[in-house]
Image (cartoon, helix red, strand yellow):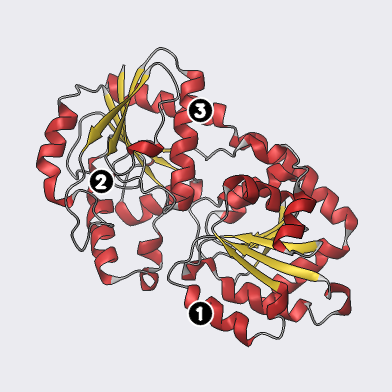
C-alpha cells in the first residue's frame, strides 16, 4: 500500500499531546511495518522537524501559503485547491489525518481521521469565536467525510456518537502510547533539583496553561496543604507552555502566601520533563476536560502515584491506578494528595497498578491497530 500521513497541521512545540501522538505513531509504525510505503506530507515550516524513520518513509513538501488572520487555525488556507491536487497526484491507497480534522477539507477517498477530543462542543466558553467557528465547521465535515475515525478513548468515541450521530462501527478506539524513556530511572535528578532549586518533595503538574487545565484549583489545594506543618518543605512544580490562562495563574500565585513554594518552569526539554516526572512525589492532574490524558500514563510508566480528575476520559485511562477527585472541589483534591502522601500501602498499590496498566499503552500494539485501520479503508 501507498499510505500518506498528512502533517500539514503540525506546528512543532505548539500542539502538545497531539504532536506527541503523531511523532510516536510514525516512529512505532516504522518498527512494525517494513512493507508498505509511507509519505509524510509536510509544509516548508515544519519539514525540518520531521525525519523519515525508515527506508519505506519519504517526505512530500507543500509550500506554506502567506499568513492570514486565521492561519494558525486553518493552515495553508489560501491554497487548498492546489494542495488537494498535489496530494491526489501521489495516488495514495490510504490517507491519515491525525489532527482531528481534515486539511484540505473535502471528501477524501480511503481516509482515516484521528479525533482527539470534542472539548469545543462541551466547553465552548474556553474558545475564541474564530476558533469555535473553525472547529465546528471542520470537525463536523471531517467526521462525516472520513471512512474511518480513530478516537483516543472510549469517552471520545461516545462523544462523537452523541454529538454527530456517527455509527459506532465507523469509530475505532486506539489509545496513545508512552515514551519508553519514562521507564528508565534518570540519575540526574539530584543535579536538576539543585540547578532549578526545587525542593526534595514536590507535586508535579505538566500542562499548558489553558483554562480547562484547572491550575487555579490545584494552587488553592496546595495552599491549603502547606498550612499543615508536615508539608512545609513540599513544593508544587508546574511545567508547560504559556497559554490563555497564564495571566490568571500568575495572579493566583502572586496572591498566595505559598508563592515561594510554587515553581513555574514553562516549557522544558523532554528529557528534563521525564526526570522531573520520575522525581515527583505524585502527579496531580485536575483537568476539567481530556480526550486522553497523556501525563497520567507517563506517571504510571515512571512509577509515580497519580491523583486525577474523575471526569471525561481520565477515569478510563487511569483505571484502578489513581485516586479520583472532583476537579471543582478543592477539599477533595487536598484529601487525595494527603492520602497518597501519608498512606505508604496506598502509594505502593497505585504504583503497582500503574505498572500493570501501562501494558495497555504499548506503541507496538497501537501501531499494529492503526495499520489494520489503514488496511480496512484501503480495501474499501
Of the image marks 2 and 3, the number of the one nearer the N terminus: 3
Of the image marks 1 and 2, the number of the one nearer the N terminus: 2
Q: CA distance from mark 1 to mark 2?
A: 34 Å
- The residue at which mark 2 appears reads as 142
For the residue pair 85 and 319, the one nearer the viewer reads as 85
Residue 263 is situated, as x and y percent measured from the top left of the image, at: 66, 69
Label 1 vs label 2, nearer the camera = 1
Answer above or below: position of 221 versus 133: below
Callout 3 secondary element? helix
The quarter holding residue 281 reads bottom right
Callout 2 secondary element? helix
Answer above or below: position of 193 versus 129: above
Residue 290 is situated, as x and y percent measured from the top left of the image, at: 50, 57
For the residue pair 233 and 183, the one nearer the viewer reads as 233
Q: Which residue shows up at 80% across the image and 82% down it?
A: 227
Q: Which residue shows up at 40% across the image and 68% down it?
A: 123
- The residue at which mark 1 appears reads as 248
Q: Quadrant of the N terminus?
A: top left
Crowd around label 1: few <14 · some 14–19 · many ≥20 (10 Å): some
The quarter holding residue 103 reads top left
Q: CA distance from mark 3 to mark 1?
A: 39 Å
Number of marks in the rendered image: 3
- The residue at which mark 3 appears reads as 28
Q: Which residue shows up at 89% across the image and 54% down it?
A: 345
Label 2 vs label 3, nearer the camera = 3
Residue 282: tell me if it is visible.
no
Indicate which disc residue 84 carries.
none
Amino acid at each position: 500500500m501507498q499510505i500518506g500521513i498528512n502533517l500539514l497541521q503540525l506546528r512543532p512545540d505548539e500542539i502538545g499531546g497531539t504532536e506527541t501522538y503523531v511523532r510516536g505513531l510514525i516512529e512505532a509504525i516504522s518498527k512494525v511495518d517494513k512493507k508498505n510505503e509511507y509519505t509524510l506530507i509536510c509544509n516548508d515550516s515544519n519539514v525540518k522537524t520531521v525525519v523519515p524513520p525508515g527506508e519505506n518513509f519519504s517526505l512530500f513538501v507543500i509550500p506554506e501559503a502567506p499568513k492570514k488572520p486565521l492561519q494558525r487555525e486553518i493552515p495553508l488556507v489560501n491554497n487548498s485547491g492546489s494542495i488537494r491536487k498535489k496530494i491526489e497526484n501521489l495516488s495514495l491507497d490510504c490517507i491519515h489525518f491525525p489532527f482531528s480534522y481534515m486539511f484540505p477539507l473535502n471528501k477524501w477517498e480511503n481516509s482515516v481521521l484521528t479525533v482527539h477530543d470534542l472539548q469545543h462542543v462541551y466547553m465552548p466558553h474556553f474558545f475564541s469565536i474564530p476558533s469555535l467557528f473553525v472547529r465546528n465547521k471542520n470537525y463536523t465535515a471531517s467526521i462525516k467525510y472520513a471512512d474511518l475515525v480513530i478516537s483516543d478513548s472510549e469517552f471520545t468515541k461516545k462523544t462523537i456518537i452523541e454529538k454527530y450521530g456517527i455509527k459506532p462501527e465507523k469509530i475505532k478506539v486506539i489509545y496513545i502510547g508512552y515514551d519508553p524513556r519514562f521507564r528508565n530511572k534518570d540519575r540526574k535528578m539530584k543535579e536538576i533539583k539543585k540547578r532549578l532549586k526545587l525542593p526534595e518533595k514536590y507535586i508535579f503538574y505538566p500542562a499548558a496553561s489553558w483554562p480547562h487545565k484547572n491550575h487555579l484549583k490545584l494552587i488553592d489545594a496546595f495552599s491549603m496543604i502547606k498550612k499543615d506543618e508536615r508539608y512545609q518543605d513540599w513544593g508544587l512544580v508546574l511545567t508547560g507552555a504559556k497559554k490563555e490562562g497564564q495571566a490568571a495563574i500568575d495572579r493566583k500565585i502572586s496572591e498566595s502566601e505559598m508563592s515561594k513554594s510554587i515553581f513555574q518552569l514553562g516549557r522544558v526539554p523532554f528529557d528534563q520533563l521525564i526526570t522531573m516526572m520520575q522525581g515527583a512525589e505524585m502527579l496531580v492532574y485536575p483537568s476539567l476536560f481530556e480526550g486522553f490524558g497523556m501525563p497520567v500514563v507517563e506517571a504510571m510508566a515512571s512509577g509515580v502515584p497519580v491523583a486525577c480528575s474523575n471526569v471525561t476520559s481520565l477515569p478510563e485511562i487511569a483505571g484502578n491506578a489513581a485516586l479520583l477527585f472532583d476537579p471543582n472541589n478543592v477539599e477533595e483534591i487536598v484529601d487525595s494528595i494527603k492520602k497518597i502522601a501519608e498512606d505508604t500501602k496506598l502509594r505502593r498499590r497505585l504504583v503497582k497498578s500503574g505498572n500493570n496498566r501501562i501494558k495497555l499503552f504499548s506503541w507496538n500494539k497501537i501501531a499494529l491497530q492503526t495499520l489494520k485501520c489503514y488496511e480496512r479503508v484501503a480495501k474499501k
